[in-house]
Amino acid sequence: MKPLGAFLLRGLFLAALGLMAGCQSSKLQPTFSPAATGAVTLTSVALTNQIDPQWLQPPSQPFTLGPGDKLEISVIGEVASKATTVVGPDGKVYYNLLPGIDVWGLTLDQARAQIQQGLSKYLKERPMVSLVLRGVESKQVWILGRVQAPGLYPLTTPMTLLEALSLAGGTLSLSAFRQQEATGASDELADLRRSFILRDGRRLPVDFARLLQQGDLSQNIYLQAGDFVYLPTAAMREVYVLGAVTQPRAVPFRDGLTTAGAVASAYGTLTGAYLDHVTVVRGSLSQPQVAVVNYKYVIRGEAPDLALQPGDIVYVPFSPYRYLYRYVKLALDTFVSSAAINAGTSLVGVQNVGQAGVFIPVGSGVQIVPPISPPPIH
């Protein structure tokens, strides 16, 4: 490993190239020599992403309406005026004689004022309107994976990660864990090392093990609309092959599976893939271990391969990078994006293909959007 002084100099060089955004490794691969024939070893990589202090503060903005939100509207004093409607895809509500009032982005008080103003054009006296929020679809968070009640949860008030997990029933209790261990059934246990939160396509550096096992509230961030929380199973029996391969997918683990075998199970590499630095990531998302395999030499029988373990991520890069943390970041970003798409697709009822599900690489532009019910007719 390079001495600390050399590491700092390289860090300055990276900053100049704009490669230091997001994370940085405390251990660098000294050389990526394609001629190396020694045993492949795993190196610990410390990712220094930090929790933004703003994430620990409750948001100050009030709730605003959007498409899919369900409203109960009535004119005070008029018993027959009560009706329930849904904010349409155009952001408008349709009530009584109103042709459509745009409430998208308005608070409840602002929306009530707009409806009152609209009704006053048809009534002799200015009406007093009651507006009650009965359901939320425009602002939700995804809580999926190994929780008691996975699904979409409305975000009407500030909500922390712990509160969201509590709404989803939480992960299995210690007593439930012991009961399942006794029967040999532990598929439902959550793997806190691999659990993650995605926000705007970016993985947040939240350590679920520190939060749920050690009670570290510095990891208990406030969620935002659209956040995707995922807790995978601890009984993972697959290896994930991602990047520049023909079919990025989860490969069922079997004894003796190596990097070359996993890549072959993904139908080989794409033209232009950088085969000298095939990266294997193992362990937690916060403190992963990584090995670099010279796949080109492995398939020629000129370099040793690496025996894989369940849960390993095999990432075939499209281009070379000088620093190990860059490969780790690409591998992890691709993994969490693919896992999120899999889980989200399953939730909204899209049929999965194959035993391992649908894997779509990061950058595909695919988005999972829950359906919005049309406004009811009264």
Image (spheres, helix red, strand yellow):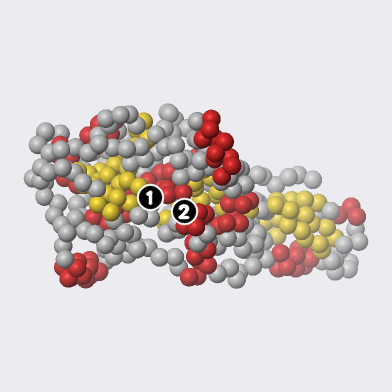
Image position, residue 89 (x, y; %): 62, 51
Where is residue 22, by image quadrant?
bottom left
> Can you identify the residue that label 2 sits on?
209
Q: Quadrant of the N terminus?
A: bottom left
> Does 152 appear above or below 18?
above
Instruction: Identify the residue at horizontal 84%, vertical 53% (top origin).
Output: 82
Instruction: Identify the residue at horizontal 38%, vertical 50% (top origin).
Output: 284
Where is residue 14, by image quadrant?
bottom left
Determine crowd level at label 2: few under 14, some 14-19, many 20+ residues with C-alpha closer than 10 A: some
Q: Is residue 206 at least partly visible in the picture? A: yes
> Does 16 appear above or below 44?
below
Total residue callouts: 2
What is the spatial separation of the Cα atoms under label 1 and label 2, in whole angstroms? Answer: 10 Å
Q: Quadrant of the C terminus?
A: top right
Cβ–Cβ below 8 Å for labels 1 and 2?
Answer: yes
Residue type for callout 1: Ser
Towards the viewer: 223 or 378: 223
Q: What number is the disc on residue 284?
A: 1
Towards the viewer: 48 or 272: 48
Image position, residue 95 (x, y; %): 77, 54
Instruction: Identify the residue at horizontal 19%, vertical 37% (top origin).
Output: 305
Instruction: Decide which of tag 1 and tag 2 comes sooner along the chain.
Output: 2
Image position, residue 183 (x, y; %): 53, 30
Towards the viewer: 330 or 183: 183
Residue type for callout 2: Ala
| Side of 78 relative to 220 (left or right) | right
Determine crowd level at label 1: few under 14, some 14-19, many 20+ residues with C-alpha closer than 10 A: some
At mark 2, the secondary structure is helix
Instruction: Identify the residue at horizontal 18%, vertical 44% (top origin).
Output: 40
Image position, residue 181 (x, y; %): 51, 35
> Does 275 appear above or below 13?
above
| Side of 322 relative to 210 (left or right) | left
